[in-house]
Protein backbone atom coordinates (compact mmCIF):
# COMPACT_ATOMS: atom_id res chain seq x y z
CA UNK A 1 0.00 0.00 0.00
CA UNK A 2 1.56 3.29 -0.98
CA UNK A 3 -1.58 5.35 -0.46
CA UNK A 4 -2.83 6.58 2.87
CA UNK A 5 -6.16 4.83 3.66
CA UNK A 6 -9.52 6.54 4.12
CA UNK A 7 -10.39 7.20 7.74
CA UNK A 8 -13.33 6.29 9.92
CA UNK A 9 -14.38 5.33 13.44
CA UNK A 10 -15.31 1.72 14.21
CA UNK A 11 -18.41 1.21 16.36
CA UNK A 12 -20.14 -2.17 16.51
CA UNK A 13 -17.90 -3.29 13.64
CA UNK A 14 -19.29 -0.51 11.44
CA UNK A 15 -16.95 1.94 9.73
CA UNK A 16 -18.38 5.37 10.47
CA UNK A 17 -17.51 8.59 8.65
CA UNK A 18 -19.15 11.61 7.07
CA UNK A 19 -22.72 12.34 8.15
CA UNK A 20 -22.00 16.01 8.75
CA UNK A 21 -19.52 15.23 11.54
CA UNK A 22 -16.66 17.59 12.26
CA UNK A 23 -13.33 16.39 10.89
CA UNK A 24 -9.63 16.64 11.71
CA UNK A 25 -6.91 17.00 9.09
CA UNK A 26 -4.20 14.34 9.35
CA UNK A 27 -0.84 15.70 8.22
CA UNK A 28 2.32 13.95 7.01
CA UNK A 29 5.01 15.46 9.27
CA UNK A 30 7.70 14.88 6.63
CA UNK A 31 6.00 17.26 4.19
CA UNK A 32 3.41 19.21 6.17
CA UNK A 33 0.79 18.07 3.64
CA UNK A 34 -2.71 16.98 4.61
CA UNK A 35 -3.14 13.28 3.84
CA UNK A 36 -6.51 12.44 5.37
CA UNK A 37 -9.73 13.72 6.94
CA UNK A 38 -10.71 12.03 10.19
CA UNK A 39 -14.33 12.11 11.36
CA UNK A 40 -14.78 13.25 14.95
CA UNK A 41 -17.36 11.77 17.30
CA UNK A 42 -20.51 13.60 18.27
CA UNK A 43 -22.10 12.81 21.66
CA UNK A 44 -24.51 10.37 19.96
CA UNK A 45 -21.53 8.40 18.58
CA UNK A 46 -20.03 8.14 22.05
CA UNK A 47 -23.35 7.02 23.53
CA UNK A 48 -23.58 4.33 20.88
CA UNK A 49 -20.00 3.22 21.58
CA UNK A 50 -20.85 2.98 25.29
CA UNK A 51 -23.97 0.94 24.63
CA UNK A 52 -22.13 -1.45 22.31
CA UNK A 53 -19.16 -1.75 24.69
CA UNK A 54 -21.51 -2.66 27.56
CA UNK A 55 -22.91 -5.44 25.37
CA UNK A 56 -19.34 -6.39 24.36
CA UNK A 57 -18.41 -6.84 28.00
CA UNK A 58 -21.43 -9.06 28.65
CA UNK A 59 -20.26 -11.26 25.76
CA UNK A 60 -16.51 -11.27 26.30
CA UNK A 61 -16.42 -11.72 30.08
CA UNK A 62 -17.85 -15.18 29.45
CA UNK A 63 -15.31 -16.08 26.75
CA UNK A 64 -12.98 -19.00 27.40
CA UNK A 65 -9.21 -18.60 27.57
CA UNK A 66 -9.06 -20.64 24.36
CA UNK A 67 -11.27 -18.10 22.55
CA UNK A 68 -9.19 -15.18 23.75
CA UNK A 69 -5.92 -16.91 22.87
CA UNK A 70 -7.22 -17.71 19.40
CA UNK A 71 -8.12 -14.07 18.72
CA UNK A 72 -4.82 -12.75 20.10
CA UNK A 73 -2.71 -15.28 18.21
CA UNK A 74 -4.75 -14.72 15.06
CA UNK A 75 -4.33 -10.97 15.28
CA UNK A 76 -0.58 -11.39 15.84
CA UNK A 77 -0.36 -13.49 12.69
CA UNK A 78 -2.33 -10.92 10.68
CA UNK A 79 -0.12 -8.11 11.92
CA UNK A 80 2.92 -10.04 10.72
CA UNK A 81 1.30 -10.55 7.31
CA UNK A 82 0.35 -6.85 7.15
CA UNK A 83 3.62 -5.61 8.67
CA UNK A 84 4.75 -3.60 5.67
CA UNK A 85 1.41 -1.85 5.13
CA UNK A 86 1.02 -1.07 8.82
CA UNK A 87 4.58 0.26 9.04
CA UNK A 88 4.23 2.50 5.99
CA UNK A 89 1.02 4.04 7.28
CA UNK A 90 2.61 4.66 10.69
CA UNK A 91 5.59 6.40 9.08
CA UNK A 92 3.34 8.48 6.81
CA UNK A 93 1.32 9.84 9.70
CA UNK A 94 3.96 9.98 12.44
CA UNK A 95 7.27 10.45 10.61
CA UNK A 96 9.55 7.86 12.23
CA UNK A 97 11.88 5.77 10.04
CA UNK A 98 10.23 2.73 8.48
CA UNK A 99 12.56 0.40 10.39
CA UNK A 100 11.22 1.78 13.69
CA UNK A 101 7.61 1.36 12.51
CA UNK A 102 8.32 -2.27 11.60
CA UNK A 103 9.66 -2.83 15.11
CA UNK A 104 6.40 -1.45 16.53
CA UNK A 105 4.50 -4.13 14.61
CA UNK A 106 6.78 -6.77 16.12
CA UNK A 107 6.27 -5.33 19.62
CA UNK A 108 2.53 -5.84 19.16
CA UNK A 109 3.02 -9.34 17.81
CA UNK A 110 5.14 -10.26 20.84
CA UNK A 111 2.65 -8.72 23.24
CA UNK A 112 -0.41 -10.40 21.74
CA UNK A 113 1.37 -13.77 21.65
CA UNK A 114 2.51 -13.34 25.25
CA UNK A 115 -1.03 -12.57 26.39
CA UNK A 116 -2.39 -15.47 24.33
CA UNK A 117 -0.35 -17.66 26.68
CA UNK A 118 -0.96 -15.64 29.81
CA UNK A 119 -4.76 -16.02 29.60
CA UNK A 120 -4.27 -19.63 30.77
CA UNK A 121 -2.45 -18.45 33.89
CA UNK A 122 -5.09 -16.23 35.49
CA UNK A 123 -5.13 -18.23 38.71
CA UNK A 124 -7.21 -17.65 41.82
CA UNK A 125 -6.61 -18.92 45.38
CA UNK A 126 -8.39 -21.27 47.70
CA UNK A 127 -8.11 -20.26 51.36
CA UNK A 128 -7.66 -22.67 54.27
CA UNK A 129 -11.02 -23.05 56.04
CA UNK A 130 -12.61 -25.61 58.40
CA UNK A 131 -14.03 -28.72 56.71
CA UNK A 132 -17.35 -28.01 55.05
CA UNK A 133 -16.50 -24.39 54.34
CA UNK A 134 -14.86 -23.02 51.20
CA UNK A 135 -13.37 -19.62 50.48
CA UNK A 136 -11.92 -18.71 47.13
CA UNK A 137 -10.40 -15.60 45.61
CA UNK A 138 -10.88 -15.11 41.91
CA UNK A 139 -9.89 -12.55 39.30
CA UNK A 140 -12.59 -11.14 37.06
CA UNK A 141 -12.33 -8.64 34.20
CA UNK A 142 -12.86 -5.07 35.43
CA UNK A 143 -15.43 -4.14 32.75
CA UNK A 144 -15.47 -1.56 29.97
CA UNK A 145 -12.10 0.17 29.58
CA UNK A 146 -11.73 3.69 28.17
CA UNK A 147 -8.26 3.74 26.61
CA UNK A 148 -6.60 6.94 25.39
CA UNK A 149 -3.30 6.58 23.56
CA UNK A 150 -0.88 9.16 22.11
CA UNK A 151 0.80 9.61 18.72
CA UNK A 152 4.41 8.72 19.48
CA UNK A 153 4.00 4.96 18.99
CA UNK A 154 1.08 4.93 16.55
CA UNK A 155 0.97 1.11 16.42
CA UNK A 156 2.52 0.11 19.75
CA UNK A 157 0.35 2.33 21.94
CA UNK A 158 -2.96 1.01 20.53
CA UNK A 159 -1.55 -2.54 20.80
CA UNK A 160 -1.00 -1.98 24.50
CA UNK A 161 -4.40 -0.36 24.97
CA UNK A 162 -6.19 -3.30 23.33
CA UNK A 163 -4.05 -6.36 24.17
CA UNK A 164 -4.34 -6.63 27.95
CA UNK A 165 -8.05 -5.69 28.28
CA UNK A 166 -9.02 -8.17 25.57
CA UNK A 167 -6.88 -10.87 27.18
CA UNK A 168 -8.58 -10.15 30.51
CA UNK A 169 -12.12 -10.41 29.11
CA UNK A 170 -12.90 -6.67 29.11
CA UNK A 171 -14.33 -4.57 26.31
CA UNK A 172 -12.60 -1.40 25.16
CA UNK A 173 -13.47 2.02 23.79
CA UNK A 174 -10.20 3.30 22.38
CA UNK A 175 -9.52 6.90 21.49
CA UNK A 176 -6.09 6.95 20.00
CA UNK A 177 -4.43 10.16 18.91
CA UNK A 178 -6.25 12.02 16.15
CA UNK A 179 -2.85 12.66 14.55
CA UNK A 180 -2.16 8.96 13.91
CA UNK A 181 -5.54 7.26 13.43
CA UNK A 182 -4.88 4.88 10.53
CA UNK A 183 -2.25 2.92 12.47
CA UNK A 184 -4.61 2.38 15.40
CA UNK A 185 -7.42 1.35 13.05
CA UNK A 186 -5.05 -1.11 11.38
CA UNK A 187 -4.26 -2.79 14.71
CA UNK A 188 -7.93 -3.01 15.72
CA UNK A 189 -8.85 -4.37 12.28
CA UNK A 190 -6.41 -7.27 12.80
CA UNK A 191 -8.26 -8.21 16.00
CA UNK A 192 -11.67 -7.98 14.32
CA UNK A 193 -10.46 -10.00 11.34
CA UNK A 194 -9.10 -12.61 13.76
CA UNK A 195 -12.61 -13.12 15.15
CA UNK A 196 -12.95 -10.63 18.00
CA UNK A 197 -16.70 -10.07 18.42
CA UNK A 198 -17.45 -6.64 16.96
CA UNK A 199 -19.00 -5.40 20.21
CA UNK A 200 -15.78 -5.91 22.18
CA UNK A 201 -13.60 -3.10 20.80
CA UNK A 202 -14.63 0.31 19.47
CA UNK A 203 -12.41 3.02 17.98
CA UNK A 204 -13.60 6.60 18.34
CA UNK A 205 -11.86 9.90 17.64
CA UNK A 206 -12.87 13.36 18.67
CA UNK A 207 -12.02 16.55 20.48
CA UNK A 208 -9.97 14.88 23.26
CA UNK A 209 -11.55 16.61 26.24
CA UNK A 210 -15.07 16.13 24.89
CA UNK A 211 -14.46 12.40 24.48
CA UNK A 212 -12.78 11.87 27.82
CA UNK A 213 -15.35 13.91 29.77
CA UNK A 214 -18.21 12.03 28.11
CA UNK A 215 -16.77 8.54 28.53
CA UNK A 216 -15.31 8.92 32.02
CA UNK A 217 -18.58 10.25 33.46
CA UNK A 218 -20.56 7.27 32.14
CA UNK A 219 -21.45 4.52 34.62
CA UNK A 220 -20.69 2.02 31.84
CA UNK A 221 -16.92 2.65 31.99
CA UNK A 222 -15.00 0.95 34.83
CA UNK A 223 -11.38 1.69 33.98
CA UNK A 224 -9.27 4.45 32.43
CA UNK A 225 -6.02 3.56 30.70
CA UNK A 226 -4.09 6.65 29.60
CA UNK A 227 -0.69 7.27 28.03
CA UNK A 228 0.38 10.88 27.58
CA UNK A 229 1.67 13.90 29.44
CA UNK A 230 1.62 14.28 33.22
CA UNK A 231 -0.47 17.46 32.91
CA UNK A 232 -3.26 15.71 31.01
CA UNK A 233 -2.83 12.58 33.15
CA UNK A 234 -3.56 14.55 36.31
CA UNK A 235 -6.60 16.13 34.68
CA UNK A 236 -7.96 12.74 33.61
CA UNK A 237 -7.19 11.14 36.99
CA UNK A 238 -9.45 13.77 38.58
CA UNK A 239 -12.26 12.98 36.13
CA UNK A 240 -11.76 9.26 36.79
CA UNK A 241 -11.90 9.83 40.55
CA UNK A 242 -15.42 11.27 40.27
CA UNK A 243 -16.57 7.91 38.98
CA UNK A 244 -14.14 5.88 41.17
CA UNK A 245 -12.54 4.30 38.09
CA UNK A 246 -9.55 2.02 38.13
CA UNK A 247 -6.65 3.76 36.39
CA UNK A 248 -3.44 2.87 34.62
CA UNK A 249 -1.48 6.04 33.92
CA UNK A 250 1.64 6.03 31.74
CA UNK A 251 2.85 9.61 31.95
CA UNK A 252 5.91 11.70 31.29
CA UNK A 253 9.53 11.12 32.19
CA UNK A 254 12.91 12.89 32.16
CA UNK A 255 15.22 9.88 31.82
CA UNK A 256 18.49 10.16 33.74
CA UNK A 257 21.53 8.31 32.35
CA UNK A 258 24.42 7.87 34.81
CA UNK A 259 27.78 7.32 33.10
CA UNK A 260 30.67 6.43 35.42
CA UNK A 261 34.43 6.81 34.90
CA UNK A 262 35.01 3.07 34.59
CA UNK A 263 33.16 2.55 31.29
CA UNK A 264 34.29 2.17 27.69
CA UNK A 265 32.94 5.54 26.50
CA UNK A 266 32.67 4.62 22.82
CA UNK A 267 30.64 1.52 23.62
CA UNK A 268 28.22 3.57 25.74
CA UNK A 269 27.95 6.25 23.05
CA UNK A 270 27.04 3.72 20.37
CA UNK A 271 23.98 2.75 22.38
CA UNK A 272 23.15 6.07 24.02
CA UNK A 273 23.13 8.17 20.85
CA UNK A 274 20.83 5.73 19.03
CA UNK A 275 18.61 5.62 22.13
CA UNK A 276 18.42 9.42 22.33
CA UNK A 277 17.51 10.05 18.69
CA UNK A 278 15.11 7.11 18.30
CA UNK A 279 11.74 8.50 17.21
CA UNK A 280 13.30 12.01 17.35
CA UNK A 281 13.41 11.72 21.14
CA UNK A 282 9.59 11.60 21.33
CA UNK A 283 9.65 8.65 23.67
CA UNK A 284 8.52 8.67 27.29
CA UNK A 285 11.55 6.53 28.28
CA UNK A 286 13.98 8.55 26.16
CA UNK A 287 17.43 9.05 27.74
CA UNK A 288 17.53 12.79 28.45
CA UNK A 289 19.76 13.92 31.32
CA UNK A 290 23.24 12.49 30.86
CA UNK A 291 24.81 12.61 34.31
CA UNK A 292 28.46 12.00 33.54
CA UNK A 293 31.34 11.49 35.97
CA UNK A 294 34.05 14.13 35.56
CA UNK A 295 36.80 11.77 34.38
CA UNK A 296 34.95 10.89 31.15
CA UNK A 297 32.81 14.01 30.75
CA UNK A 298 34.73 15.73 27.93
CA UNK A 299 35.24 12.56 25.91
CA UNK A 300 31.58 11.64 26.32
CA UNK A 301 30.27 15.11 25.36
CA UNK A 302 32.56 15.45 22.34
CA UNK A 303 31.81 11.92 21.13
CA UNK A 304 28.07 12.51 21.51
CA UNK A 305 28.20 15.79 19.58
CA UNK A 306 30.30 14.27 16.80
CA UNK A 307 27.83 11.41 16.33
CA UNK A 308 24.84 13.78 16.53
CA UNK A 309 26.23 15.91 13.69
CA UNK A 310 26.63 12.81 11.51
CA UNK A 311 23.14 11.42 12.29
CA UNK A 312 21.13 11.14 9.06
CA UNK A 313 17.88 13.11 9.22
CA UNK A 314 15.27 12.68 6.49
CA UNK A 315 11.92 11.33 5.36
CA UNK A 316 11.20 8.15 7.31
CA UNK A 317 10.16 6.38 4.11
CA UNK A 318 13.62 6.80 2.57
CA UNK A 319 16.37 4.21 2.98
CA UNK A 320 19.18 5.19 5.30
CA UNK A 321 17.18 7.70 7.34
CA UNK A 322 18.18 7.45 11.00
CA UNK A 323 15.83 10.11 12.31
CA UNK A 324 12.60 11.43 10.76
CA UNK A 325 10.73 14.68 11.37
CA UNK A 326 9.04 15.42 14.67
CA UNK A 327 5.42 14.31 14.76
CA UNK A 328 3.67 17.68 14.74
CA UNK A 329 4.51 21.40 14.59
CA UNK A 330 4.20 21.74 18.39
CA UNK A 331 7.38 19.73 18.91
CA UNK A 332 9.95 21.82 16.93
CA UNK A 333 8.34 24.90 18.50
CA UNK A 334 8.94 23.36 21.93
CA UNK A 335 12.56 22.56 20.99
CA UNK A 336 13.19 26.17 19.97
CA UNK A 337 11.69 27.44 23.20
CA UNK A 338 13.53 25.01 25.51
CA UNK A 339 16.92 25.16 23.77
CA UNK A 340 16.67 28.94 23.44
CA UNK A 341 15.92 29.27 27.14
CA UNK A 342 18.79 26.94 28.10
CA UNK A 343 21.26 28.95 26.02
CA UNK A 344 20.05 32.21 27.56
CA UNK A 345 20.73 30.67 30.97
CA UNK A 346 24.30 29.79 29.90
CA UNK A 347 24.15 26.25 28.46
CA UNK A 348 26.65 25.38 25.74
CA UNK A 349 25.28 24.19 22.39
CA UNK A 350 27.51 21.37 21.10
CA UNK A 351 25.35 20.17 18.18
CA UNK A 352 22.11 20.99 16.38
CA UNK A 353 19.89 23.63 17.93
CA UNK A 354 18.06 24.45 14.72
CA UNK A 355 15.30 23.34 12.38
CA UNK A 356 16.24 21.33 9.30
CA UNK A 357 14.89 22.10 5.78
CA UNK A 358 11.95 24.25 4.84
CA UNK A 359 9.14 21.72 4.84
CA UNK A 360 7.82 19.33 7.47
CA UNK A 361 8.63 19.41 11.16
CA UNK A 362 12.33 18.53 11.25
CA UNK A 363 14.65 19.47 14.08
CA UNK A 364 18.36 18.65 14.19
CA UNK A 365 19.85 16.09 16.60
CA UNK A 366 21.03 18.40 19.38
CA UNK A 367 23.41 18.36 22.32
CA UNK A 368 23.52 20.85 25.19
CA UNK A 369 26.18 20.70 27.93
CA UNK A 370 26.88 22.53 31.18
CA UNK A 371 23.13 23.17 31.39
CA UNK A 372 22.29 25.29 34.47
CA UNK A 373 19.69 23.97 36.89
CA UNK A 374 17.46 26.98 36.37
CA UNK A 375 17.01 26.19 32.65
CA UNK A 376 13.45 25.04 31.93
CA UNK A 377 14.72 22.00 30.06
CA UNK A 378 16.25 20.62 33.27
CA UNK A 379 12.71 20.36 34.70
CA UNK A 380 10.35 19.96 31.75
CA UNK A 381 10.29 16.81 29.61
CA UNK A 382 11.79 17.95 26.28
CA UNK A 383 10.20 15.11 24.26
CA UNK A 384 12.58 15.84 21.41
CA UNK A 385 16.03 15.13 19.95
CA UNK A 386 18.18 16.84 22.57
CA UNK A 387 20.72 15.38 24.99
CA UNK A 388 21.60 17.31 28.16
CA UNK A 389 25.13 16.47 29.33
CA UNK A 390 26.48 17.68 32.68
CA UNK A 391 29.54 16.67 34.78
CA UNK A 392 29.35 15.37 38.37
CA UNK A 393 32.06 14.48 40.88
CA UNK A 394 30.65 11.63 42.93
CA UNK A 395 28.27 8.70 42.80
CA UNK A 396 26.26 10.32 45.59
CA UNK A 397 25.81 13.53 43.58
CA UNK A 398 24.87 11.54 40.49
CA UNK A 399 22.17 9.57 42.31
CA UNK A 400 20.83 12.78 43.86
CA UNK A 401 20.56 14.33 40.39
CA UNK A 402 18.85 11.20 39.01
CA UNK A 403 16.20 11.46 41.76
CA UNK A 404 15.86 15.26 41.72
CA UNK A 405 12.74 15.52 39.58
CA UNK A 406 9.20 14.40 40.39
CA UNK A 407 9.38 11.94 37.47
CA UNK A 408 10.40 8.29 37.75
CA UNK A 409 9.76 6.36 34.55
CA UNK A 410 13.00 5.02 33.06
CA UNK A 411 16.58 5.43 34.25
CA UNK A 412 19.83 4.10 32.83
CA UNK A 413 23.29 3.59 34.28
CA UNK A 414 26.62 2.57 32.81
CA UNK A 415 29.30 1.14 35.08
CA UNK A 416 31.38 -2.02 35.20
CA UNK A 417 31.50 -1.99 39.04
CA UNK A 418 29.16 -4.79 40.15
CA UNK A 419 28.63 -3.49 43.68
CA UNK A 420 27.77 -0.08 42.35
CA UNK A 421 25.29 -1.61 39.90
CA UNK A 422 23.40 -3.05 42.88
CA UNK A 423 23.48 0.24 44.79
CA UNK A 424 22.08 2.06 41.77
CA UNK A 425 19.29 -0.48 41.34
CA UNK A 426 18.42 0.07 45.01
CA UNK A 427 18.69 3.86 45.14
CA UNK A 428 17.27 5.18 41.88
CA UNK A 429 13.57 6.04 42.05
CA UNK A 430 12.22 4.74 38.79
CA UNK A 431 9.75 2.21 37.42
CA UNK A 432 12.37 0.75 35.07
CA UNK A 433 16.17 0.75 35.16
CA UNK A 434 18.58 -0.31 32.43
CA UNK A 435 22.06 -1.12 33.69
CA UNK A 436 24.59 -1.25 30.86
CA UNK A 437 21.62 -1.52 28.52
CA UNK A 438 18.99 0.65 26.91
CA UNK A 439 16.58 -2.26 26.56
CA UNK A 440 14.11 -1.80 29.38
CA UNK A 441 10.93 -3.32 27.99
CA UNK A 442 9.55 -6.63 26.84
CA UNK A 443 6.15 -8.26 26.47
CA UNK A 444 6.74 -10.17 29.72
CA UNK A 445 7.99 -7.19 31.75
CA UNK A 446 5.94 -4.47 33.47
CA UNK A 447 6.21 -1.08 31.78
CA UNK A 448 5.29 1.86 33.99
CA UNK A 449 6.55 4.55 36.30
CA UNK A 450 6.48 5.95 39.81
CA UNK A 451 5.91 9.46 41.20
CA UNK A 452 4.54 11.86 38.54
CA UNK A 453 5.30 9.32 35.81
CA UNK A 454 2.10 7.57 36.77
CA UNK A 455 0.98 4.34 38.31
CA UNK A 456 0.07 0.83 37.28
CA UNK A 457 1.86 -1.01 34.52
CA UNK A 458 1.24 -2.25 31.02
CA UNK A 459 2.73 -5.45 29.58
CA UNK A 460 3.69 -8.51 31.58
CA UNK A 461 1.36 -10.36 33.94
CA UNK A 462 1.03 -7.05 35.80
CA UNK A 463 -0.60 -5.42 32.77
CA UNK A 464 -3.15 -8.21 32.60
CA UNK A 465 -3.96 -8.08 36.32
CA UNK A 466 -4.43 -4.32 36.00
CA UNK A 467 -7.51 -5.11 33.87
CA UNK A 468 -9.00 -7.37 36.53
CA UNK A 469 -10.66 -7.04 39.93
CA UNK A 470 -10.68 -9.60 42.72
CA UNK A 471 -13.75 -11.24 44.18
CA UNK A 472 -13.64 -13.25 47.40
CA UNK A 473 -16.34 -15.94 47.62
CA UNK A 474 -17.00 -17.45 51.08
CA UNK A 475 -19.25 -20.53 51.20
CA UNK A 476 -20.52 -21.94 54.51
P1 LIG B 1 -1.01 16.73 25.08
O1 LIG B 1 -0.46 16.58 26.43
O2 LIG B 1 -2.16 17.66 24.89
O3 LIG B 1 -1.47 15.32 24.47
C1 LIG B 1 -0.83 14.10 24.77
C2 LIG B 1 -1.82 13.01 24.37
O4 LIG B 1 -2.95 13.05 25.20
C3 LIG B 1 -2.35 13.15 22.94
O5 LIG B 1 -2.44 11.88 22.36
C4 LIG B 1 -3.73 13.76 23.12
O6 LIG B 1 -4.63 13.37 22.10
C5 LIG B 1 -4.15 13.19 24.44
N1 LIG B 1 -5.04 14.07 25.16
C6 LIG B 1 -4.89 15.38 25.38
N2 LIG B 1 -5.90 15.87 26.11
C7 LIG B 1 -6.72 14.83 26.36
C8 LIG B 1 -7.93 14.68 27.06
N3 LIG B 1 -8.50 15.70 27.70
N4 LIG B 1 -8.51 13.46 27.09
C9 LIG B 1 -7.94 12.40 26.48
N5 LIG B 1 -6.78 12.48 25.82
C10 LIG B 1 -6.18 13.68 25.75
O7 LIG B 1 0.06 17.32 24.14
P2 LIG B 1 0.91 16.88 22.91
O8 LIG B 1 1.37 18.14 22.28
O9 LIG B 1 0.22 15.88 22.04
O10 LIG B 1 2.16 16.21 23.61
C11 LIG B 1 2.90 17.04 24.49
C12 LIG B 1 3.49 16.29 25.59
O11 LIG B 1 2.81 15.10 25.90
C13 LIG B 1 4.88 15.85 25.26
O12 LIG B 1 5.78 16.89 25.51
C14 LIG B 1 5.09 14.70 26.20
O13 LIG B 1 5.55 15.20 27.44
C15 LIG B 1 3.72 14.14 26.38
N6 LIG B 1 3.51 12.87 25.67
C16 LIG B 1 3.83 11.75 26.34
C17 LIG B 1 3.69 10.53 25.73
C18 LIG B 1 4.05 9.27 26.45
O14 LIG B 1 4.32 8.26 25.81
N7 LIG B 1 4.05 9.25 27.78
C19 LIG B 1 3.23 10.47 24.42
C20 LIG B 1 2.88 11.65 23.76
C21 LIG B 1 3.03 12.86 24.41
Image (cartoon, rainbow, N blue to C red):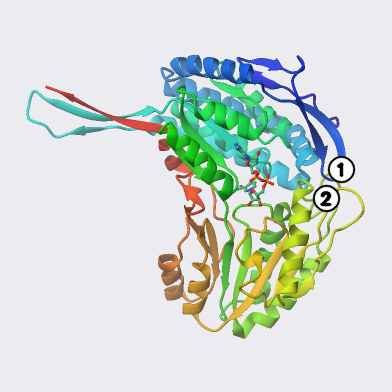
Q: List x then y, in percent, for residue 87.
A: 74, 38
Tell me the residue that label 2 is attached to: 361
User: Quick one: 321 or 21, which is closer to the camera?
Assistant: 21
- Cα separation, mark 1 vs mark 2, equals 7 Å
- Taking the image as four quarters, which one is ligand 1 found in? top right
Residue 210: give x, y in percent of width and height. 62, 30
- Residue 37 position by quadrant: top right
Q: Position of residue 321 (x, y in %)?
A: 82, 53
Residue occupying image coordinates x 87% and y 58%:
356
Asked if disc 1 is less than 8 Å from ligand 1, the answer is no
Q: Is residue 32 left or right of residue 117?
A: right
Residue that lies at the very extreme toward the left in this rendered image: 131
Q: Label 1's element? A: loop
Q: Which mark is residue 32?
A: 1
Classify residue 199 by image quadrant: top right
> Dots 1 and 2: beta carbons under 8 Å?
yes
Amino acid sequence: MSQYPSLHMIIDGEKISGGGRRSFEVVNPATGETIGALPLAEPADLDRALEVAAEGFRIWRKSTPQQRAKVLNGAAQLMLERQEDLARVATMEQGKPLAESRIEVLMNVNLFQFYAGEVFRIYGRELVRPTGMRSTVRHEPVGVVAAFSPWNFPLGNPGRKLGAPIAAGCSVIMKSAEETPASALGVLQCLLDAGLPKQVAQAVFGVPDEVSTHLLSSPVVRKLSFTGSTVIGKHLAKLAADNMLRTTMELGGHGPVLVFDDVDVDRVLDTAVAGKYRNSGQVCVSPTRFIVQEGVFEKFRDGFAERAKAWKVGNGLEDGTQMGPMANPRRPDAMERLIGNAREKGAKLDAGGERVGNQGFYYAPSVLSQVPMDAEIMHEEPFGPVALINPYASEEAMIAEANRLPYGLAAYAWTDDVKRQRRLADEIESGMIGINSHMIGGADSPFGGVKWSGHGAEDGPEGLLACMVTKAVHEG
